[in-house]
Amino acid sequence: MDCVTGEGDTVILYCAELHWRGLHAAYSNLLSAIDSQATSRSSMGRYRIECEDGRIAVELPRLQVEGEWKSAAAAVQETVFPGPDGTSPDGSALWECLQPQATVRVQLGQRELTGLGYLERLTLTLPPWQLPLRELRWGRFVSPTDHVIWIDWQGPYSTAFAIHNGCKRRLELVTETEVAIESGTLRMSDSLPLRAGRLGATVLPGAPMLRRLLPRSLGNIEEHKWRSRGVLETASGQSEGWVIHEVVHWKV
């Protein structure tokens, strides 16, 4: 889940539950960029999430952050990897965008941030290091009038699509500066790097238990994530907002 203020201050929260080989663990991560200074902190402690009537409240006590997301658009979902036989839920990846466009308030220590944001949930029934994936390009654009999400999954199994204002669209082009879909073109500029490197160096140091228990190859997954200004041009006009986007390379 994320929030970007009008000035570009950015907060991204990750909350994860792992059930694997008798292990049950909770993990959370706070990635923030305040005044263009990006920082990241992680915790293995429990977190709280409450969902009610289009409102999702999150509290991460150990990271001293809490927030509230209020939905401004209908949820969408897609099974991005349907499993080995195409129908079985075993070994699948289900993506649920619970709030593709939201108004958000986040309390970060003593600082309160307000802006537009986004919230999704990913459910994997196979270990991430076993995904048939070589490269993933993902991003979301949110403005007061539009939202666009794209997923470009390439590897032994490939799929690519975009969601524009709740409607599934063909994804035609994805780069670090431009995304073209059948209903318009999103151009990105003034990109701020939020995180870059292999997970073993950027994320897992904050979760020593997971680092000991999970395969070492998981740390070789390489992530590059940015926050950028975005301008979406469609047949009906132009809208401006903020983009969070990433490219992930599976090197397992």
Image (cartoon, helix red, strand yellow):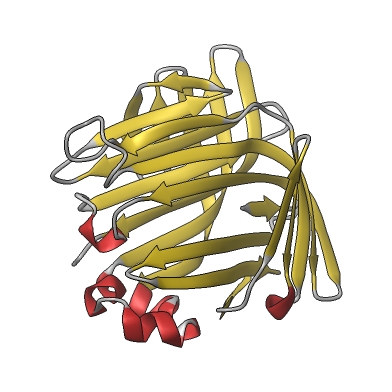
Residue 178 visible somewhere in the drawing: no
Residue 237 placed where, x, y %? 62, 17
Q: Based on the displayed image, in which of its 4 quarters is residue 239 positioned? A: top right
Which residue reaches farthest front? 22
Q: Going 42% across and 31% down the picture, which residue do you hit?
A: 78
Residue 120, quarter of picture: top right
162 in relation to 105, above or below:
above
Residue placed most toward the observer, 30 or 229? 30
Give percent across and percent down for residue 79: 37, 34
Residue farthest along the left direction in this orientation: 156
Up-down relation of residue 129 to residue 235 (above or below): below
Toward the viewer: 54 or 167? Answer: 54
Q: Residue at x 49, y 33 (%)?
A: 186
| Residue at position x 58%, y 79% in the image | 43
Tally the numbered discs.
0
User: Relative to the observer, which residue lies in front, 114 or 231?
Assistant: 114
Q: Is residue 227 left or right of residue 156?
A: right
Q: Looking at the rendering, in which quadrant would you find the C terminus?
A: bottom left
- Please provide percent x and percent y for residue 132: 19, 49
Residue positioned most to the top: 235
Residue at the spot x=25%, y=51% of the render? 135
Q: Position of residue 181 (x, y in %)?
A: 40, 24
Q: Is residue 91 left or right of residue 119?
A: left
> Does residue 37 appear anywhere in the picture?
yes
